Image (tube, rainbow, N blue to C red):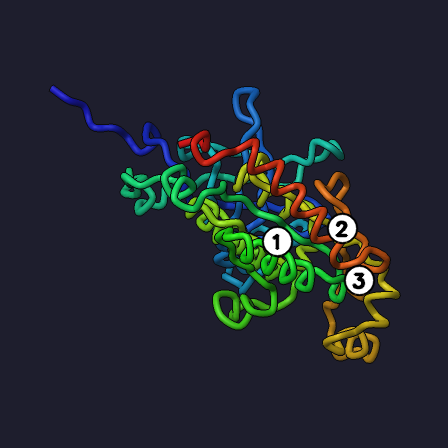
Amino acid sequence: MSTALSPSDILSEQFEALVQWHDSEAGLAGREYLFRMQGAAHTLSVTRIKYKIDPATGGHLPCTTLQRNETAICNIATSTPIQAGQTLSLLDEGLGRTLASVELKHILRRAENLHTQALSVQRHHREQLNGHPGCVLWFTGLSGSGKSTLANALEQSLHEQGWHTYILDGDNIRQGLNKDLGFTDADRVENIRRIAEVAKLMVDAGLVVMTAFISPFRKERDMARELIGSDRFLEVYVDTPLEVCEARDVKGLYKKARQGLIPNMTGINSPYEPPEQPGLILSGASETLDGAVQSLMDWLSIKSNQLTPQEAPR
């Protein structure tokens, strides 16, 4: 005779949770946060901030970010299946502080019915057909640094050699897939999360993907690397000084930001966090376009030899 599982016995990765935010830096939907369970490190992300709770009345208030001492009801996703009813502490171990406490209220039932579908044609089959491995070159740098110019020139060179490629460009993506997003910190995090997921799918298709986004925050670039896999990910820092980018001002954005017309301009009134250990640094001010493209081609040649289509993991 079988015994039905109680809700507390069921493992899941999707929950509704009560989140109490303690840190002075805002909590953002889409960003991954660390927690520890039984001595092991895991990650958690807020997939949706549903509402915050008014401490005076208990009423529901609209909420897009989690601010210090606020309590909110959120949908969350964990990197590993766990049980409901637990309380987790989100940690910044580098700074030795607790960011938030998360009480897992109940499982989101739809998550229990989702299963990974086994497909017959896998990445290594597509790579064999293409003749090269899939990977991502993640260009990051200030607006006007030269990211899109470099990605476009590299794609031209690869196309001439028969490589299968695609460019995910910031302006183009924001006119379609991400046209619902603005330029707040929360929207920038979600913008990069979506791009990372799309790039991962394209790598699975065996393509060489070039992403040209400011992607100002290290945490989201690190998330993209982890999602895609460090062996197939090259972070390319286009290191162009702000004064050079502003002098170019191809889109007129810096001028508008200086006039107060753009409130969240990276490098002016919104932060940019340079990569600490990028895979490749290119100078958008002094390096020639041909020289930069050759550096990228050299990396791809090495990567192609390391991950030949026949050896590409299943």
Relative horizontal placement of residue 158, taking residue 10 as reference (left or right): right
Q: Position of residue 8 (x, y in %)?
A: 35, 30
Relative horizontal placement of residue 274, taking residue 181 as reference (left or right): right
**The image quarter in which residue 4 lies:** top left
N-terminal label among 3 and 1: 1
| Disc 2: CA contacts within 10 A as few (<14), some (14-19) or many (>=20) | some
Say whether residue 260 is visible: yes
N-terminal label among 2 and 3: 3
Tell whether label 2 touches label 1 (CB within 8 Å).
no
Which residue in the protein does label 2 denote? 273
| Vertical side of 244 occupied by 92: above or below | above
Q: Residue furthest right?
A: 243
Which residue in the protein does label 1 denote? 66
Q: Position of residue 135 (x, y in %)?
A: 54, 44
The Cα atoms of the two marked residues, 1 and 2, are separated by: 21 Å
Q: Tag 2's secondary structure?
A: loop
In front of the other: 149 or 19? 149
Relative horizontal placement of residue 233, taking residue 165 as reference (left or right): right
